[in-house]
């Protein structure tokens, strides 16, 4: 890859990085602008740092003394602060986006010169940058000096003046390797100046640090931690107290007891029951064989009884129920004269058959009861292990939440997929705005919209790359996204490509279905 393209990539990445910082601040201030009145008052009081808290408190007390409305003052101040910051950030974003679009357009015009030999490509690059850097310098300087843009200057604000690059022709004797090296150094100096200028201009308008936003919870937490530390110190051995040692010992015993009762013993019990089940397989087979022997014995007794007492010979495959019906009819007949038939009839044999039937029923019931008891023993062991299992799930959930924290659209899961889909929708919206500006011949605004489209495409590119590689769609998806970024492709064609992106790639769909 020619050195000119590497330098261009650095310039584009610097610009995209600045745009991303501005976008994060814009999202924060937009959320404040769209918040409720109570949220705005909370912001004015508790999310701007201790000094702002004291100032807001003093202003509130002053308003109360003069019978004024402190809420109206806080809401008005919040609206003024947020509107100023949104105006500053939006204007800076538009100018950087226009610069990004200008770079893309100039590179597209001079693509042939950039793909030639190293010296010729550098010469073409210098010509391009001498075109776009002065435009950016004028744009940012006018923005910072314009009173309508609400930019603020302070003593630390540095004036933005880009170094002009040499335009010596490569065929000229003045061209040398040292000249090219010095010019490249000037390019990176210009980038440093741009970063410094943006940082100085946005220092008071960017999103506050988390320490500033959450200073009150942090302060309360520090006070609570200090109080807890003092309380623990009073009960420690350093102050001659044995309370801390006793508590530690009790905690160890509690943890050991919990581990023994809800983890170790249930697992051992489940293991033993499962192993015992396999060990007692032969015994269970024997128990079932005993039941089978009792059933066969009863069947033979019934067959013999029916053959001897009935005129019809029963079938050998007759069921127990059919044979028992015959026996019960005979039993009812014999029981009409119990004393006589007990000694000379078939009543005794019928009673023995009933005893054998009761024995069979009892063995079957005992076998089922044994199976139920074994199942319940495992169930009770599992129930005892449920608290430990719940704690393990909670720990895994916390670890997963920590690992996926702040991954945004690049992460996994339903929320990340939805964010990637929203980026795709935003690209479509930016393209439609760009098309509208082109139709209305608003060239400057169109350049800004195209730059914002490129920025959103870059965010989508980085968010979807890993997931597209996993699904095998990356090669085709990358080509489509490059087509969306090309200045020489018509807006109508780009919108057609976007329709394909929405539904042809699984990694960009809002859901897996």
Image (cartoon, helix red, strand yellow):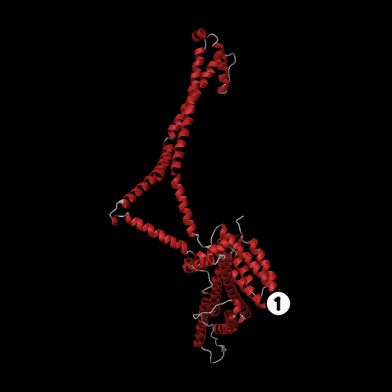
Taking depth in this image into account, of 326 and 78 the one nearest to the observer is 78
Q: Is residue 286 rendered to the left or right of residue 485?
A: left
> Is 198 above or below relative to 480?
below
Looking at the picture, tell me which residue is in the foreground, 251 or 471: 251
Quadrant hosting residue 37: bottom right
Q: Percent x, y for residue 149?
A: 60, 77
Residue that label 1 marks: 441
Residue 101 at x, y = what percent?
Answer: 61, 76
Query: Who's the residue at 55% across and 69% down the image?
Result: 25
Q: Is residue 251 above or below residue 178?
A: above
Q: Looking at this rendering, what residue extends furthest in the left direction?
A: 240
Where disc 1 sits, the SS reads: loop
Say which quarter of the image contains residue 105.
Answer: bottom right
The one of 185 and 68 positioned closer to us in this rendering = 68
Numbered marks: total:
1
* Residue lying at 54% horizontally and 59% vertically, measured from the top left: 412
**Other-residue count near label 1 (Cα within 10 Å), few / some / many at <14 / 14–19 / ≥20:** few
| Visible residue check, residue 501 | yes
Looking at the image, residue 443 sits to the left or right of residue 120; the answer is right
- Of the 4 image quadrants, the one containing the C terminus is bottom right
Tell me where residue 115 appears, x and y as whole percent: 58, 80
Nearer to me, 26 or 494 = 26
Q: Which percent across, then down, holds residue 205?
A: 54, 72
């Amino acid at each position: 890859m020619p050195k000119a393209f590497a330098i261009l990539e650095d310039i584009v990445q610097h610009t995209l990085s600045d745009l991303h910082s501005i976008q994060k601040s814009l999202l924060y201030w937009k959320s404040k602008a769209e918040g409720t009145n109570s949220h705005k008052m909370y912001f004015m009081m508790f999310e701007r740092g201790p000094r702002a808290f004291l100032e807001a408190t003093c202003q509130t007390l002053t308003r109360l003394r003069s019978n004024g409305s402190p809420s109206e003052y806080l809401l008005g101040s919040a609206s003024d602060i947020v509107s100023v910051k949104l105006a500053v950030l939006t204007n800076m974003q538009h100018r950087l986006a226009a610069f990004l679009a200008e770079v893309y357009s100039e590179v597209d015009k001079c693509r042939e010169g950039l793909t030639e030999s190293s010296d010729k490509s550098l010469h073409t690059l210098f010509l391009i940058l001498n075109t776009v850097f002065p435009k950016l310098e004028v744009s940012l300087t006018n923005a910072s000096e314009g009173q309508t843009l609400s930019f603020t200057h302070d003593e630390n604000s540095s004036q933005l003046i880009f170094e002009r690059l040499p335009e010596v022709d490569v065929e000229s004797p003045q061209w040398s390797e040292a000249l090219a090296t010095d010019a490249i150094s000037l390019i990176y100096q210009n980038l440093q100046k741009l970063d410094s200028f943006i940082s100085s201009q946005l220092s008071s308008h960017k999103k506050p640090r988390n320490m500033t936003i959450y200073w009150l919870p942090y302060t309360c937490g520090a006070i609570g931690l200090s109080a807890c530390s003092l309380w623990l110190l009073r009960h420690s051995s350093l102050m001659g107290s044995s309370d801390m040692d006793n508590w530690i010992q009790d905690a160890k015993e509690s943890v050991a007891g919990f581990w023994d009762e809800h983890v170790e013993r249930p697992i051992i019990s489940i293991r033993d029951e499962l192993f015992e089940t396999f060990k007692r397989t032969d015994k269970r087979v024997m128990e079932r064989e005993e039941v089978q022997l009792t059933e066969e014995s009863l069947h033979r007794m019934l067959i013999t009884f029916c053959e001897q007492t009935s005129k019809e010979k029963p079938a050998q495959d007759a069921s127990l129920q059919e044979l028992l019906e015959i026996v019960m009819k005979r039993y009812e007949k014999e029981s009409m004269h119990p004393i006589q038939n007990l000694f000379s009839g078939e009543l005794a044999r019928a009673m023995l058959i009933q005893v054998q039937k009761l024995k069979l029923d009892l063995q079957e019931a005992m076998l089922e009861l044994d199976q139920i008891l074994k199942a319940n023993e495992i169930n009770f062991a599992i129930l005892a292990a449920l608290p430990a299992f719940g704690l393990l799930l909670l720990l895994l959930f916390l670890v997963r939440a920590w690992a996926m924290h702040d991954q945004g659209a690049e992460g996994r899961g339903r929320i990340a997929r939805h964010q990637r889909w929203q980026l795709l929708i935003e690209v479509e919206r930016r393209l439609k705005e760009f098309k509208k500006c082109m139709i209305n011949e608003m060239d400057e605004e169109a350049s800004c919209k195209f730059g914002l489209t490129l920025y959103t495409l870059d965010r989508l590119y980085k968010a979807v790359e890993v997931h597209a590689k996993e699904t095998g769609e990356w090669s085709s998806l990358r080509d489509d996204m490059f087509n969306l970024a090309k200045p020489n492709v018509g807006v109508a064609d780009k919108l057609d490509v976007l329709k394909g992106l929405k539904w042809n790639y699984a990694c960009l769909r809002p859901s897996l279905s």
